[in-house]
Image: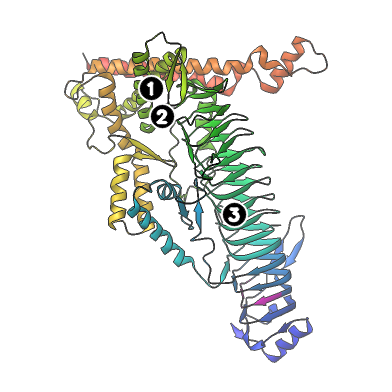
Amino acid sequence: MRTLTQSEIGLLQQQGCTAQDWQTVFVSDSESLKYIRDTRFSGEVRLGSFRASFELPGGMHKHSGIFRATLHDTTVGDDCCIENIKNYIARYDIAEGCFIENVDIILCDGPTSFGCGVNVAVLNETGGREVTLHDRLTAHEAYLEAFYRHRPKLIAQLKRFAAERTAERTSERGTICHHATIVDTGYIKNLYVGPYAKIEGAGRLKNGSLCSRQEAPIHVGYGVIADDFIVQDGSSVEDGTTLSRVYVGQACTLGHGYSASDSLFFANCQEENGEACAIFAGPFTVTHHKSTLLIAGLFSFMNAGSGSNQSNHMYKLGPIHQGAMERGAKTSSDSYILWPARIGAFSLVMGRHSSHPDTSDMPFSYLIEKNGDTYLAPAVNLRSVGTVRDAQKWPKRDHRCKEGRLDQINFNLLSPYTIDKMVRGLHVLQELETLSGPTSDTYAYQSAKISNSSLHRGQQLYRIGIQKFLGNSLISHLERTDCSSAESLLEGLKPKHTDGRGVWVDLAGLIAPKELVNALLDEVESGAVASAEEFNRRLCQLHSNYYRYEWTWAYEQMLDYYGLYPDRITIEDLISIVSQWKESVTTLDRMLYADAKKEFSLSAHTGFGFDGASQRTIDRDFEQVRGDFESNPFVTETLAHIERKSQLGDRIIAMLQQLNK
């Protein structure tokens, strides 16, 4: 770049331009000067060449250049279009191909870290579980920082990781990366704008980062107000959404006037209409309703019904109470939970609950209000069509780019994490029956009541779930084992290592053995894992080795559940396990089939066939809208699944019988 000649200065002055000092204005070529009009310069300004045009929606074209703007200490890359800046742009580096039009002000008042270093007070609004934002934050790092406060050395190291990244991002100049678009927007201060990000009609964006990528651009829409925030690639924040001290993970959608403060949203969350305060929203947390409030809770793979609400204080010491809904939990319309409480994985909450239940050892349950009391129906969600449908849709709704994913997400419905809870739940139900007798009307458990029928049904369903998982794991391992002889098969079943034994944990999407997680955290505390990059790489390794660890756990659990010994296990034992697996799978599928059939019952036809229609017309209207039961995709897949698994079970059993001859 070079300074302007006198003739070039004269040309710019003729085109309505002024400068505090023309010697601090640098240009690339003289041909582009005709595309600079009615512009004021101050401080050091560097201007690229303007040769390209932008094609706008509707077929309109605009040539690159600078028109009706004020620039202070700013660099403008090649082929940008900057037009109608009401106040000024100050201390920004604007890369090539950017389109900036009808903006009030864009300034960097440094030094700033663009949202990095902001502390977000999740769960406890008064503090104590703060998570420090940075632009490489993962759900797992945030989970450990928020919930592992019993390890202060770990928290100090994680804070150091965040501080180091914050220092790297700190600058006295703002950046608008290449091919970004900012139009019809008000106040922008200390904002990092990533490549191909698009800001349209936002009201105020202050102290934040839009970590956009060409493969996964970010969109910020009309009326958005955001302070102290980070938004990751592939996400959109739309339609009057208000954010204050918020992290938005990859491929999230926030819109329709959503309001959030002191909250974290990780991959593929969808938040619309409602409100969030001090929540940790793990992957796939979804709420669509204006009447829904999520507050002071941990959620993931969660769908909140309309009018869902929680309370995080009891009018004594303020908003200090917290709760957790483990992965896959749901709330029905108008549900209410008084924190503290903990809801087990893949459970459904209906009604109002003020007795602080803890059902973490009772996954796949219903929590129901009856006459002001909390009733627990263990395991019934295992046979729910909705549960299976959710498990099938989550991988399909992962809209992140395959490359550059921050969160490591395990989608498995049945895993050592949930099966271990089922085993504990089964033992609890058996103990309750032993202590109170098999004929008791109700059983008391963790501030909840369990009816007699629910207790016995829960035991049956937990056994089905456990047998299904153990059989799944066994059959998967057999496919990778030398089955040429009984000896090689039995030897090949034995795990080659001990990694995976014991309790497993869910680190906001990443399911891993607790022992290995603790070993990694020991290394972080000692300094052996010295950076956030290395820490995240090690977490990725835990995720990628899931199935290796799973078999170690499943093998040990299989021996314990079926009362077997490693050196005495026989082919007959395996045949029995596969036979029970086949029966469990088909029984559960038949339950799902029956549950789906309810959606097509005569009562479900209510509201169809308008204007005094006959029953035939009602039925035809229902079929045209909802389809026929037998041709429903879920129903046909369930029937096909029964057939496939039955054939697989028969084939495995025949193979084992052949080896046993």
**Is residue 41 or residue 335 the one in the foreground?**
335
Query: Does residue 533 appear in the picture of this structure?
Result: no
Q: Position of residue 396 (x, y in %)?
A: 53, 37
Model colouring: rainbow
Q: Quadrant of the N terminus?
A: bottom right
Amino acid type at image mark 3 = Ser
Q: Earlier in the sequence, mark 3 or mark 1?
A: 3
Q: Please rate how many residues cluster around mark 3, counting C-alpha atoms within 10 Å: few if below 14, some from 14 to 19, many from 20.
A: some
State the residue lying farthest toward the front: 316
State the residue lying farthest toward the top: 439
- Whole-number angstrom distance, CA of label 3 to CA of label 1: 45 Å
Q: Helix or strand or loop: what does disc 1 sit on?
A: helix
Q: Position of residue 71 (x, y in %)?
A: 67, 76
Q: Which mark is residue 244?
A: 3
Amino acid type at image mark 1 = Lys
Q: Earlier in the sequence, mark 3 or mark 2?
A: 3
- Report if residue 39 lies within the magenta region: no
Q: Is residue 101 left or right of residue 108?
A: right
Give residue 628's quadrant in the image.
top right
Asked if the residue at tag 2 contacts the one at tag 1, i.e. Cβ–Cβ closer than 8 Å, the answer is yes
Please identify, in this view, whether the residue under mark 3 or under mark 1 is nearer the observer: 3
Q: Residue at x 72, y 66 (%)?
A: 104
Q: Is residue 509 above or below residue 611?
A: below
Give residue 433's quadrant in the image.
top left
> Can you identify the residue that label 2 sits on?
414
Amino acid type at image mark 2 = Leu
Q: Earlier in the sequence, mark 1 or mark 2?
A: 2
Where are the magenta residues, as a range? Answer: 70-78
Q: Helix or strand or loop: what does disc 2 sit on?
A: loop
Q: Please rate how many residues cluster around mark 2, counting C-alpha atoms within 10 Å: few if below 14, some from 14 to 19, many from 20.
A: some
Query: Does residue 341 appear in the picture of this structure?
Result: yes
Q: Position of residue 188 (x, y in %)?
A: 65, 64
